[in-house]
Image (cartoon, grey):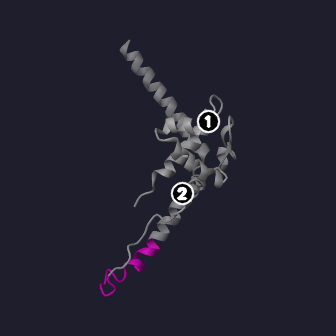
Amino acid sequence: MQIGTKFSVSIHILLSVEVFREDYKVTSDFIASSVNTNPVVIRKLMSQLKKAGLIEVSRGTGGISLSRPASKMTLQDVYRAVEPQSDLFRIHKDTAPGCPVGGNIENLLSPFFQTLQASFMESLTNVTLEDLLSSLNSLKERNKDQSGSASRKKA
């Protein structure tokens, strides 16, 4: 069980749209170079993000923009846009009904898994794209400070 990379790549797309919007025309080719993947992969995810109302795509020279402020876009919005199969956990089928474990495994695990799923989805509502942008800016500053101190040590 794991969430696929579509979720993280979609967040990467949205962050790139915001980070680079002032200085570059943000296109699928531009984002693909940052993700280090084929632009077709980016376009497929962008299509899902657009369908979910998270981005606007201007044909030709327009590029990509967020359809609403980063503070109003949660990770749950992104997850639901690109992970249509929303169950994190699947229980194996065709177990032996006469076995005390096999005959009860679905009834045993289903409520537990549903609670975990609900908790996960709720936690995604608590993080916005703006929160991630703020954290990204902090990381960039920290990396800048570290590279500056490394340069000073060499001198």
- For label 2, count other residues whose C-alpha is less than 10 Å away and answer few (under 14), some (14-19) or many (20+): few
Q: Residue at x 36, y 15 (%)?
A: 154
Give the CA separation, mark 1 to mark 2.
29 Å
- Type of residue at label 1? Val
Secondary structure beneath label 1? loop
Give the residue at mark 2: 123
- Type of residue at label 2? Ser
- For label 1, count other residues whose C-alpha is less than 10 Å away and answer few (under 14), some (14-19) or many (20+): many
- The quadrant of the image that shows the N terminus is bottom left
Give the image location of residue 95, x and y in percent: 34, 80
Give the residue at mark 1: 26
Q: Residue at x 54, y 61 (%)?
A: 84
Q: Of tags 1 and 2, which is closer to the observer? A: 1
List the single residue furthest toward the left.
Answer: 99
Give the image location of residue 130, x and y in percent: 61, 43
Q: Residue at x 46, y 38 (%)?
A: 36
Q: Nearer the viewer, residue 34 or 148?
A: 34
List the single residue furthest toward the bottom.
Answer: 98
Give the image location of residue 147, x and y in percent: 43, 23
Give the quadrant of residue 99.
Answer: bottom left
Give the quadrant of residue 124.
Answer: bottom right
Give the quadrant of residue 79.
Answer: bottom right
Which residue range is magenta in the image? 96-112
| Placement of 10 over or under 85, stated as above or below | above
Secondary structure beneath label 2? helix
| Placement of 133 over or under 74, stated as above or below | above
